[in-house]
Image: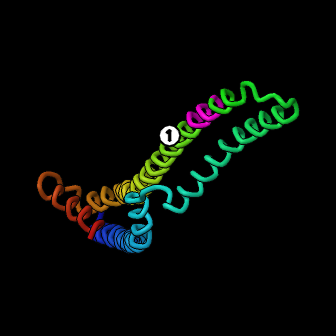
Amino acid sequence: MGRGAQQSTRDAVDRQLGIQNQLIQRSDTQGQQDRQLMLPAIQDLLTSQGYSPEEQSAITQEGMGAARTAFDALQERAANRTAATNNSAGFGDLTAELGRQETQNLSQQARQNQIAFANEKQRRRLAGLSAIGQTYGIDTNLLARAMGVPASLLDARARASGGSSGLGGLFGLGAGIGSLFG
């Protein structure tokens, strides 16, 4: 290869590397801006306490209300039967049994609510961690793609520089890789 052809090849490769560097720089800048916008939301997910106190109260009231409704209906039915038959025998025992069952059911509902609250807190934290992984995974993919495209350009530039081997060839390749990342 003549000197003119070598210089022409080096110039073409340098132009292409310059274009690649500009694209990488723009992409990196955009990625940083995107991360700055996303990080407060991700931080909120990571430090989230799960449902707000208002949401927890609404969930608790709804669950407890549903549990009480069934027992209220059973107790009303027993009272109606007592009134209809005019026989109150066993009404006290039935009411006591319904009260015990209601207490057990309400405590189970409270336990399920606490588990749901803890699960929601954990779910939000995992969503925050996932978002961080995806956010920084973009940079990893960009870097991998950036390394894949210019590698052939660097090889062409090294060959155009006279195909030197040894330290000179290594330094030429190192300078090319260095130019990719600033």
Question: Magenta segment range?
Answer: 97-105
Q: Quadrant of the N terminus?
A: bottom left
Snapshot colouring: rainbow
Task: Please give the residue where the numbered disc 1 appears in the rendered image.
Answer: 111
- Percent position of residue 142, x then y: 40, 59
In this view, 56 is above or below 109:
below
Describe residue 56's horizontal placement relative to residue 76 as left or right. Answer: left
Residue 171 belongs to the span the image colors magenta: no
Residue nearest the observer in this picture, 30 or 123: 123
Three-letter residue code for mark 1? Arg
Q: Quadrant of the C terminus?
A: bottom left
Q: Main secondary structure of the magenta part?
A: helix
Q: How many marks?
A: 1
Residue nearest the observer in this picture, 98 or 17: 98
Asked where in the image residue 66 lies, by quadrant, the reply is: top right
Residue nearest the observer in this picture, 153 or 6: 153
Query: Is residue 92 something that shows in the picture?
Result: yes
Asked where in the image residue 161 lies, by quadrant, the reply is: bottom left
Describe residue 116's horizontal placement relative to residue 28 as left or right. Answer: right
- Residue visible at 13% across and 51% down in the picture: 166
Callout 1: 10 Å neighbours few (<14), some, many (20+)? few
